Amino acid sequence: VCASAKTGSAVIQEKGVSEFDSGLSRLESLSQVSGVLGCQWGDEGKGKLVDILAKHFDIVARCQGGANAGHTIYNSEGKKFALHLVPSGILNEDTVCVIGNGVVVHLPGFFKEIESLESNGVSCQGRILVSDRAHLLFDFHQEIDGLREAELAKSFIGTTRRGIGPCYSSKVIRNGIRVSDLRHMDTFPQKLDLLLSDAASRFQGFNYGPDMVRQEVERYKRFAEKLEPFITDTVHFMNDAVSQKKKILVEGGQATMLDIDFGTYPFVTSSSPSAGGISTGLGIAPRVVGDLIGVVKAYTTRVGSGPFPTEILGKGGDLLRFAGQEFGTTTGRPRRCGWLDIVALKYCCQINGFSSLNLTKLDVLSDLPEIQLGVSYKQIDGTPIQSFPADLRVLEQIKVEYEVMPGWLCDISSIRKYSELPKAARQYVERIEELVGVPVHYIGIGPGRDALIYK
Ligand code: GTP
């Protein structure tokens, strides 16, 4: 541990205040409806913060995405849980978890996740509510996700092949099947047949026959019975909770740079992981949403294809990948790694209006003698670019300008007070705050629940 740690404790004693206690009171004073959203291309470590915050909230709700979110969290005994669809609040036994109307639900996966949680001693009964308006994601959506990627050949998106995009497509072209349709098994086969015939007419490689429909209907009859205790009018539930002054935490999946509108289209997800998605995905008014915390890694990673201006290719990227264990929770795919991109982060802060940031994985940078911050973009001819460009051609050609900062070259993972961090680490954090104009209130220095510094 760094030498500066001693100096830090002395400072605290002088101040006569505990930074940790003031951090905790900050958690308690978060607004009635708060949210945790990703600031980069996903995998920022949102799950850990949600899990920590959950005990200060009555409800944790997901508003978008599906089982493509891969949150990894550790309980107080250090047991690892990989969650995909179930909100990260589930490990906190007093929290009710809501899967909102904006989420797409793959029932086989949902029940598998519940079985795994229950077999690890986490009780789910009565604690998970699934919106009757949420759309059902079928196995065939996953199949056509793969077919579509194959069709795109070299310009494939790099999706998780979980069928998320095809399911949202069904929703938008209005032949999707919703959770409430499970209550009408008389019309369900017809709806499923329509959905499948549409897919078959679109994808040559996709075939289905009457047997497949029959089997799927039988399977979904069983799912319908099993799901019944979870099905809820979550719009009513959420608005009731708002009126009763219950505390609600919204857990974002993916991140703004993958947003269908604001991300690096078309290399994006099919939902709205930014602030706007909270209202459309839960049916609560924008004015009730208060504090939003943006989660940002101390560097950048991205899975799949698409522009990544500050990417580090070769050995440098490998170093970060192994130090940060940057391999997907859901797919195991290696993540592309690079320096923190301040231009993208500022853009993300504008869109979401974050009240604070959680800088995660600062510990991963501990072995680097120098750290770079991508602070501005220039066009190939040297013209400065004022904001994050929509045009992928511009993005592919931009020149990133970096600020080089000294590293701290020591283990910071056991430090719990901001003032005990080495000077270079504090300088790095404070430079980020200065550049983006949003305070960093939480700093991650390890994967565990307790590995968080309150600033
Ligand atoms: P998505 O919704 O898929 O974007 O997931 P996520 O944002 O919750 O991130 P995910 O859990 O997939 O990845 C974060 C990984 O980093 C997990 O393995 C966490 O345990 C780990 N992690 C989180 N915070 C820290 C940290 O501060 N330091 C270190 N070393 N690991 C961390």
Image (cartoon, rainbow, N blue to C red):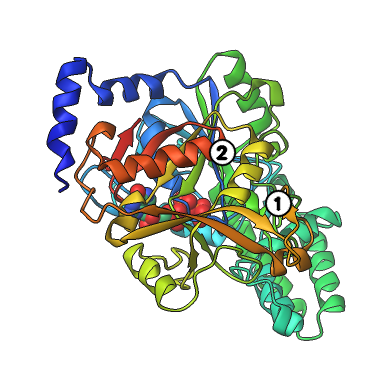
Residue 361 in sight here: yes
Q: Which mark is residue 388?
A: 1
Which of the 4 image quadrants contains residue 80? bottom left
Q: Who comes first in sequence, dot 1 or dot 2?
A: 1
Side of 80 where 257 appears, left or right: right
At x 15%, y 33%, the residue is: 7
Q: Nearer the viewer, residue 446 or 344?
A: 344
Q: Is mark 2 within 8 Å of ligand 1?
A: no
Tell me the element at label 1.
Answer: loop
Residue 357 on image: x %, y % = 48, 36
At x 45%, y 25%, the residue is: 58
Q: How many marks?
A: 2
Q: Amino acid at mark 1?
A: Phe
Side of 20 where 392 appears, left or right: right
Marks 1 and 2: CB-CB under 8 Å? no
Q: Amino acid at mark 2?
A: Val
Q: Nearer the viewer, residue 46 or 279?
A: 46
Tell me the element at label 2.
Answer: helix
Mark 2 Cα within 10 Å, few/some/many (few <14, many 20+)? some
Q: Residue furthest front?
A: 382
In the depicted structure, whether residue 109 falls above or below residue 26: below
